[in-house]
Image (spheres, rainbow, N blue to C red):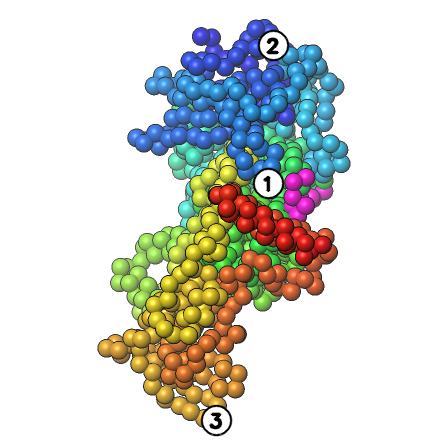
């Protein structure tokens, strides 16, 4: 069959074909059928989108399937937007098409379901997906979009008009084709005053030849950590995104002793066609010209796009989000607000330009009132080259499961950007301040946390610490690495750590090592010894925290798949929460001793926390407690493991208010008493835990407590939203349990009816 020439854009955006020609009505009305062939999966989706627009429904990108051999995508499903039940607006519609990739590289429809279980929209008089031409519409920022109804139609591309979502198609002019001075070809030995100058040159060269550029790897000095070389690569380098083809073209620059930069490696060969491209053009060309520097010491990132006029327009790439994201996100936010009275979103605006975006639904905000004492800012998108900087605020619930406390797209990695992000999260979460924050080590983040959350303890992300250790310890002797690990993980006191560290630095003559000095100065934010006395809800210090969304949503997720994947990942995690809640109220954990203290905790704690406590209680039987000091109401005990003289800790007890402290600091770190304290309690015949050692966040009913003093700090509207979510979740549990049998239905109905009588 002939290649598809009708291109569709995501539903809600109407595209006028560049050439001005449209296909015949017969082509546009082609019905999807098994065996229909396309050049790409995107082309198949566009075709299905056009068909859906004509018939009267919307589509979403569904599941994808990968090859077991090489991990490449082998088939994709495109589904009706009402597929599934994650939102109230969805009806579980079964309509879909599935396309499979053949050995030839073509994509063929191999499965199809046309039947819908809901009413379809009416067709307009004009059945063509190309609507009547309208006057050109200037691109709008989200600020402008917020002041008018949802964006549905974006103007024509040709003749200087605006394009879909800020995208402009044009033919690239070859060098010298417009009478201008041609750009010199890059070559090994070409010199620049700055790295930014080299990047601008390579961008200009790329624009004239017909490809786009991304910033690739950087290399640092082993001595002082400064950047010594940089790679600029073709935008189609790698395979992290469907549009990338593993192109090998790049230019690498190296810093000379004089401070200038020189091209030392170069590859001009591309494995894809050059020429006509799609580039993003800054909608705010008259807005702020302040270019934000990246974390790489002054490396400014800019694009240069050649317009039909032949002029070069500089575009700030301080935001990697892309202006086409804002209308899509706005539509999603408005839809969610209609369904969820507690839904919150905010957009950072600078001189009329939209930058960072933050949002959180009612459940995330409610969860923060219970579990916002420890927060993880997950910016794992930074681990590799990314399309969009998606970040999440994550907490830990009473089952020790991750809970979403907010989501964001980050414009750049400056102090101002992170300060806005933390302030916005703080406002959305009814001013509930976290005790501890796990986030990256970057100076911008450190400064923002200090400004917005003074007193909160900032713990560095383990993945970043490990990455920097791999980079900086690579050139060190094996003996040093061994002693370094021993110093960090086996030191028991601050005096021991400081003595061992200084001895290590002197022994290997590393006093001038800038990285080691920096890590020592920040030791309270990453060394286990210093972190044990801070509350982190038991999140392991030396383990990398997994991303809340896993691989479903990350820095490589394309726009058209972002919202469906986001909702799917969020619903999956919340379903896991519901299952654990259901088990908590329908099952019982078993006691393994006859201790009254165990029975007390069995009734109070969730399964997960009770298991931790129970294990500590059982372990306490293997320990011996010896009183070593007593004065008035204060006693001190040495608690050691039988047969192991090295496993010992000091426990101090005060009879005045039954306060206790152990040198292992498990309670301070995790909020559960340790085996050493439990041994002392047994010696003192204390049969129940004092109330101050039972944290409300670990209780079975923690989900329904409004902590952090939220009752007095939130508005009546926000408090009502919290209560609505809590009551709705409780009602859902009655419904789920009540529909398992007729008897349970009658019981659930009777309970709710009797409860209703008491309310009225």
Magenta region includes residue 337: no
Q: Is residue 545 left or right of residue 5?
A: left
Decide which of 213, 741 is in the foreground and name it: 741
| Residue name at image x 53 percent, y 10 percent | 30
Most extreme residue toward the right, as rendered? 147
Q: Name the residue carrying label 3.
A: 632
Task: Tell us which disc is closer to us: 2 or 3.
Answer: 3
Examine the rendered structure and indicate whether residue 88 appears above or below residue 429. Answer: above
Image quadrant in which the N terminus is located = top left
Most extreme residue toward the left, as rendered? 643
The numbered mark at residue 473 is none
Can residue 62 be seen?
yes
Residue 467 place in picture, x, y as percent: 39, 52
Q: Name the residue carrying label 1.
A: 319
Residue 685, by quadrant, is bottom left
Q: Could you say whether the residue bearing mark 3 is in a helix, strand or loop?
A: loop
Q: CA distance from mark 2 to mark 3?
A: 94 Å
Span highlighted in magenta in the image = 338-351
Q: Name the residue carrying label 2.
A: 22
| Residue name at image x 38 percent, y 80 percent | 682
Q: Is residue 741 left or right of residue 730?
A: left
Image quadrant in which the C terminus is located = bottom right
Circle 1 Cα neighbour tier, 10 Å, few/some/many (<14 / 14–19 / ≥20): many
Which callout, 2 or 1, points at the residue further toward the start of the chain?
A: 2
| Residue name at image x 69 percent, y 44 percent | 350
Q: Is residue 264 left or right of residue 30?
A: left
Examine the rendered structure and indicate whether residue 226 appears above or below residue 56. Answer: below
Residue 445 place in picture, x, y as percent: 55, 55
């Amino acid at each position: 069959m002939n290649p598809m020439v009708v291109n569709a854009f995501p539903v809600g955006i109407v595209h006028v074909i560049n050439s001005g020609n449209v296909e015949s009505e017969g082509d546009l009305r082609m019905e999807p059928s098994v065996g229909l062939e396309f050049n790409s999966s995107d082309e198949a989706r566009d075709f299905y989108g056009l068909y859906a627009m004509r018939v009267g429904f919307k589509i979403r990108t569904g599941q994808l399937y990968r090859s077991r051999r090489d991990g490449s995508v082998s088939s994709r499903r495109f589904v009706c937007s009402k597929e599934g039940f994650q939102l109230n607006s969805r009806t579980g519609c079964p309509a879909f098409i599935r396309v499979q990739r053949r050995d030839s590289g073509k994509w063929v429809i191999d499965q199809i379901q046309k039947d819908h279980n809901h009413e379809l929209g009416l067709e307009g008089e004009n059945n063509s997906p190309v609507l009547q031409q309208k006057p050109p519409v200037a691109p709008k920022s989200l600020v402008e979009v917020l002041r008018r109804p949802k964006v549905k139609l974006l103007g024509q591309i040709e003749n200087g008009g605006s394009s879909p979502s800020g995208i402009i198609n044009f033919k690239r002019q070859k060098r010298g084709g417009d009478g201008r001075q041609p750009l010199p070809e890059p070559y090994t030995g070409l010199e620049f005053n700055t790295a930014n100058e080299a990047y601008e040159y390579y961008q200009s060269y790329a624009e004239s030849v017909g490809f786009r550029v991304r910033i690739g790897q950087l290399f640092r000095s082993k001595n002082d950590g400064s950047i010594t070389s940089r790679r600029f690569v073709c935008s189609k380098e790698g395979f992290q995104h469907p549009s990338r083809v593993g192109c090998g073209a790049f230019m690498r620059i190296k810093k000379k002793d004089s401070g200038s930069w020189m091209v030392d490696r170069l590859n001009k060969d591309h494995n894809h066609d050059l020429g006509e491209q799609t580039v993003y053009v800054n909608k705010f060309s008259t807005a702020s010209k302040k270019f934000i520097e990246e974390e790489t010491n002054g490396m400014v990132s800019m694009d240069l796009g050649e317009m039909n006029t032949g002029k070069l327009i500089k575009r700030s790439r301080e935001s990697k989000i892309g202006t086409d994201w804002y209308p899509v996100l706005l539509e999603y936010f408005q839809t969610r607000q209609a369904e969820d009275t507690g839904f919150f979103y905010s957009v950072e605006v600078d001189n009329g330009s939209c930058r960072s975006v933050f949002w959180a639904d009612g459940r995330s905000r409610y969860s923060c009132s219970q579990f916002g004492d420890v927060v993880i800012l997950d910016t794992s998108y930074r681990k590799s080259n990314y399309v969009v900087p998606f970040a999440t605020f994550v907490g830990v619930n009473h089952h020790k499961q991750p809970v979403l406390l907010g989501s964001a797209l980050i414009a750049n990695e400056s102090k101002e950007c992170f300060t806005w992000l933390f302030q916005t999260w703080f406002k959305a979460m009814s001013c509930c301040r976290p005790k501890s924050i796990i986030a990256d080590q970057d100076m911008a983040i450190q400064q923002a946390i200090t400004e917005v959350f003074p007193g909160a303890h900032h713990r560095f992300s383990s993945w970043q610490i490990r990455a920097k250790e791999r980079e900086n310890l690579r050139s060190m002797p094996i003996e040093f690495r061994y002693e370094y690990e021993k110093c960090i993980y086996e030191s028991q006191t601050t005096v021991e750590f400081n003595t061992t560290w200084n001895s290590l630095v002197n022994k290997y003559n590393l006093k001038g090592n800038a990285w080691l000095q920096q890590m020592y100065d920040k030791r309270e934010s990453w060394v286990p010894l210093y972190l044990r006395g801070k509350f982190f809800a038991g999140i392991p210090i030396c383990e990398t925290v997994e991303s809340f969304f896993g691989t479903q949503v990350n820095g490589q997720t394309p726009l058209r798949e972002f919202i469906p994947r986001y909702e799917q990942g969020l619903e999956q995690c919340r379903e896991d929460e519901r299952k654990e809640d259901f088990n908590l109220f329908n099952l019982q954990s078993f006691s393994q001793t006859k201790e009254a203290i165990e029975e007390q905790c069995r009734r109070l704690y969730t399964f997960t926390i009770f298991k931790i406590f129970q294990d500590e209680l059982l372990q306490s039987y293997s320990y011996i407690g010896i009183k070593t000091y007593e004065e008035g109401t204060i006693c001190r005990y040495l608690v050691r493991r039988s047969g192991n003289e090295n496993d010992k800790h000091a426990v101090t007890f005060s009879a005045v208010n039954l306060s206790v402290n152990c040198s292992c600091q498990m309670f301070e770190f995790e909020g559960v008493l340790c085996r050493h304290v439990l041994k002392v309690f047994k010696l003192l015949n204390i049969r129940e835990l004092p109330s101050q050692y039972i944290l409300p966040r670990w209780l079975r009913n923690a989900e329904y407590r409004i902590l952090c003093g939220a009752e007095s700090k939130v508005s009546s509207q926000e408090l009502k939203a919290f209560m609505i979510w809590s009551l709705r979740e409780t009602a859902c549990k009655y419904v789920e349990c009540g529909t398992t049998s007729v008897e349970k239905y009658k019981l659930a109905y009777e309970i709710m009816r009797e409860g209703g009588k008491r309310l009225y």
